[in-house]
Image (cartoon, rainbow, N blue to C red):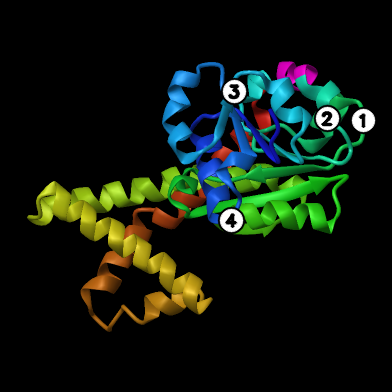
């Protein structure tokens, strides 16, 4: 069984990456996805992917190997597959909290490693994915970046910022969802039913983000376009700030960052 790309761990993230690879013009037949319970990814067979349980065979002939397992599984996985890896391959890790240095130490040999931190919006091609690399040249990084560009936006950063990226991008999905939930509840109190309120809140949040991304403007610049003297928008904004909105968000983000820095493996 041969493949150009191996995805070790066919969970939600691994499956999303596989589907994203199809968008980047990779043939499904060139991709092998592994999982202990193949019944859980049987639906991917109709797309043309190869499915397997043997991680060693899957990685042996692949030029690109994605690691999409839980942090607690990484040590055993690397010990299992390291004999089948070589310097001509690219190893892509999506594992939270595991540095490229740690992966390299487990392998005991020099292999190009790219670390990627996507978020759950990868499932719909809207991820914000941060990337960094070790023992990888620009060509290696560009190859991996092309894949994740088919699944949203990418940013190459220094590895020291990866934990911060986890909070801002990965945890950030939950923070944004909490705003939408709160706005929905306010909408219900004003008279909308729950589905209407959520649609309005979610589409408005999406529109706000799109304005910033498309215009490359500052949030305050866009806010100024909505606020008018003695208007309802400025009254609402001021009350939110009096109640600590910005402060609470910043404190929450920094608390998450403190937590991720203190998590013991």
Read off the magenta span. 75-80
Say few, some or many: other residues with alpha carbon within 10 Å of mark 1 (under 14 / 14 to 19 / 20 or more).
Answer: some
* Front of the two marks 3 and 1: 3
Q: Which residue is mark 3?
A: 52
Find residue 43 and report its horizontal and vertical position in percent. 41, 31
| Disc 3 to disc 1, C-alpha distance | 26 Å
| Disc 1 to disc 4, C-alpha distance | 31 Å
| Disc 3 to disc 4, C-alpha distance | 22 Å
Mark toward the start of the polypeptide (1 vs 4): 4
Q: Which residue is mark 2?
A: 85
Give the label on residue 109, or none.
1
Find residue 53 and report its horizontal and vertical position in percent. 60, 18
* Front of the two marks 2 and 3: 3
Badge 2 vs badge 1, beta-carbon distance below 8 Å: yes
Helix, strand or loop under label 3? strand
Quarter containing the N terminus: top right
Q: Is 159 located above or below residue 100 in the figure?
A: below
Mark toward the start of the polypeptide (3 vs 1): 3
In the picture, measured across the screen, residue 150 lies left or right of residue 98, that is: left
- Between residue 114 and residue 226, name the one nearer to us: 114
| Residue drawn 26% across the image and 57% down it | 201
Q: Is residue 253 visible?
A: no
Mark toward the start of the polypeptide (4 vs 2): 4
- Between residue 123 and residue 163, name the one nearer to us: 123
**Number of numbered discs present?**
4
Say few, some or many: other residues with alpha carbon within 10 Å of mark 4 (under 14 / 14 to 19 / 20 or more).
Answer: few
The rendered magenta stretch, by its main secondary structure, is classed as: helix
Find residue 158 and report its horizontal and vertical position in percent. 77, 52
Helix, strand or loop under label 1? loop
């Amino acid at each position: 069984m041969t493949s150009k790309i191996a995805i070790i761990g066919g969970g939600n993230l691994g499956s999303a990456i596989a589907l994203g690879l199809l968008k980047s013009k990779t043939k499904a037949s060139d991709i092998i996805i592994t999982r202990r319970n193949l019944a859980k990814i049987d639906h991917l067979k109709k797309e043309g992917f190869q499915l397997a349980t043997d991680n060693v065979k899957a990685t042996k002939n692949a030029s690109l190997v994605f690691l999409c397992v839980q942090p607690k599984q990484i040590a055993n996985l690397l010990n299992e597959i390291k004999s089948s890896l070589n310097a001509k391959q690219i190893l892509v890790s999506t594992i939270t909290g595991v540095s490229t240095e740690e992966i390299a130490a487990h392998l005991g040999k020099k292999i190009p490693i790219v670390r990627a931190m996507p978020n759950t919006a990868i499932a719909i091609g809207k991820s914000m994915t941060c990337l960094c690399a070790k023992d990888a040249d620009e060509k290696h990084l560009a190859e991996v970046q092309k894949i994740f560009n088919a699944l949203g936006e990418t940013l190459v950063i220094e590895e020291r910022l990866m934990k911060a990226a986890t909070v801002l991008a990965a945890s950030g999905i939950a923070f944004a969802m909490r705003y939408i939930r709160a706005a929905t509840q306010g909408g219900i109190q004003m008279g909308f039913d729950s589905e209407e309120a959520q649609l309005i809140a979610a589409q408005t949040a999406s529109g706000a983000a799109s304005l910033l991304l498309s215009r490359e403007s500052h949030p305050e610049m866009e806010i100024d376009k909505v606020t008018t003297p003695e208007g309802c928008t400025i009254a609402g904004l001021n009350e939110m700030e009096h109640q600590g909105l910005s402060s609470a968000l910043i404190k929450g983000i920094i608390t998450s960052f403190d937590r991720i820095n203190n998590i013991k493996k």
